[in-house]
């Protein structure tokens, strides 16, 4: 399946914020921690001819597709795509391009539409597939969802479903998984979906939201250590910003958003000076939601490195974008 159908969330806002006040002949340097289909990367590279974008992704499909797209575009040399988990990026730069600082960095977290629509990756219960859910699907040292479901204790499973999925039937589901495991391992998405459904009261089994949604999200977060890598990433990226450089993070659920909010708050108390670009997160416009309903839970937070604190209202225009939606 091609990545071409991918819709880049809050693309216009990200480009406006990261490139907005960078009218300069100096060479600009951006980084994209989540290349995906390359939407934000290519938009940044095209927005400023005098820029280079350092992008990373850990997903083999994204990397293969991206390398092809880069070679077919006229952006080779200005878009550099690397295969790594984004938590390795700060160390990689300090070891290989010591001193490199960035005018803007974007991280558009989580999995892409491609992951949900590519049935064999095991992210979605819409398709029957092995329970895998690794973004870095070539990496055999990562525990798959099947491994977790079939080997973790009931208490551990219940904690995962509750903590990462806010699943209120977490204990019941964990007990049912253990019961099922005694007969045969749970290997596929459809098997797990059915087990979860059976734990829900009948009147909730056929609602608008599939009962398996929360547990699937929880397992995906656990498999890819999504919260841990985010917690490592933000403090390591902040020192890599130039003065005036901005770090923009798009999250898709409250667990991630809380981490970003708190780490940005911590940064405001650090020795280097930072300012929040917008107090309230920026969310997709009505137009974007109509075009891409999957962006409905997106929230964009931005922090800027400054050399002195600016007046509180300087970015009122962006607060308005966020607040009026
Ligand atoms: C939401 S998509 C990004 C879409 C992209 N912004 C675009 O416009 O096309 C997230 C991408 O980030 C990658 N990703 C998520 N977490 C990652 C991590 N810790 N390290 C590297 N890549 C990651 C996923 O593999 C996926 O391709």
Image (cartoon, rainbow, N blue to C red):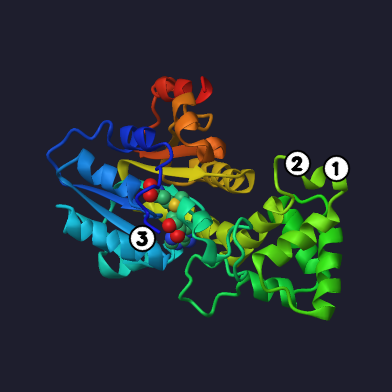
Q: Check the picture and name the quadrant holding the N terminus.
A: bottom left
Give 258 or 238, whichever is nearer the viewer.
258
Q: What element carries label 3?
A: strand
Under 8 Å from ligand 1: the CB of mark 3? yes
Left or right position of 222 against 64: right
Name the spot of residue 54 as percent of width and height, x first. 28, 56
* Callout 3–callout 1 Cβ contact below 8 Å: no
Residue hosting label 3: 56
Which residue occupies 39% across, 55% down? 36
Residue at the image position 82 percent from the left and 73 percent from the top: 180
Give the mark, 3 or 2, whose residue is nearer the N terminus. Answer: 3
| Residue name at image x 64 percent, y 58 percent | 125
Instruction: Please state which of residues 230 and 130 is positioned toward the viewer in this rendering.
Output: 130
Question: In the rendered structure, are the residues bearing label 2 and label 1 in contact, judged by CB atoms less than 8 Å apart?
Answer: yes
- Which of these two is toward me, 306 or 90? 90
The percent position of residue 169, horizontal first and vertical second, equals: 83, 53
Res 306 label: none
Q: Quadrant of residue 153?
A: bottom right
Please name the residue that numbered disc 2 is placed on: 207
* First reached walking from the N terminus: tag 3 or tag 1: 3
User: On the image, numbered disc 1 is attached to which residue?
Assistant: 203
Residue at mark 3 to residue at mark 1: CA–CA distance:
44 Å
Does the residue tagged 1 have its C-beta within 8 Å of any atom of ligand 1?
no
Find residue 263 and report its horizontal and vertical position in percent. Answer: 54, 47
**CA neighbours of label 2 inside 10 A, class few (<14), some (14 to 19), many (20+):** few
Cα distance between the residues tagged 2 and 1: 8 Å
């Amino acid at each position: 399946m091609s990545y071409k159908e991918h819709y880049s969330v809050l693309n216009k806002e990200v480009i406006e914020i990261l490139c907005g006040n960078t009218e300069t002949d100096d060479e600009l340097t951006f980084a994209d921690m989540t290349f995906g289909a390359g939407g934000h990367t290519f938009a940044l590279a095209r927005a400023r001819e005098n820029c280079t974008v350092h992008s990373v992704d850990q997903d083999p499909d994204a990397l293969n597709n991206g390398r092809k797209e880069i070679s077919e575009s006229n952006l080779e040399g200005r878009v550099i795509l690397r295969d790594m988990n984004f938590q390795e990026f700060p160390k990689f730069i300090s070891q290989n391009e010591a001193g490199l600082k960035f005018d803007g960095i974007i991280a558009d977290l989580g999995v892409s539409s491609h992951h949900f629509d590519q049935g064999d990756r095991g992210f979605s219960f819409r398709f029957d597939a092995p329970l895998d859910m690794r973004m870095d699907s070539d990496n055999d040292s990562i525990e798959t969802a099947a491994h977790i479901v079939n080997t973790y204790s009931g208490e551990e499973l219940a904690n995962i479903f509750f903590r990462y999925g806010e699943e209120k039937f977490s204990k019941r589901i964990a007990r049912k998984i253990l019961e099922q495991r005694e007969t045969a391992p749970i290997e596929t998405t459809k098997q797990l979906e059915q087990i979860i459904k059976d734990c829900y009261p009948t009147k909730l089994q056929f609602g608008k939201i599939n009962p398996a949604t929360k547990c699937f999200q929880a397992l995906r977060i656990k498999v890819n250590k999504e919260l841990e890598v985010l917690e490592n990433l933000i403090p390591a990226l902040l020192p890599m910003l130039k003065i005036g450089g901005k770090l923009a993070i798009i999250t898709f659920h409250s667990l991630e958003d809380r981490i970003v909010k708190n780490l940005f708050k911590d940064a405001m108390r650090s020795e280097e000076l930072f300012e929040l670009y917008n107090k309230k997160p920026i969310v997709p416009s009505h137009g974007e939601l109509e075009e891409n309903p999957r962006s409905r839970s997106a929230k964009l937070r931005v922090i800027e490195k400054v050399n002195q604190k600016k007046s509180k209202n300087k970015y009122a225009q962006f607060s308005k974008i966020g607040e009026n939606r």
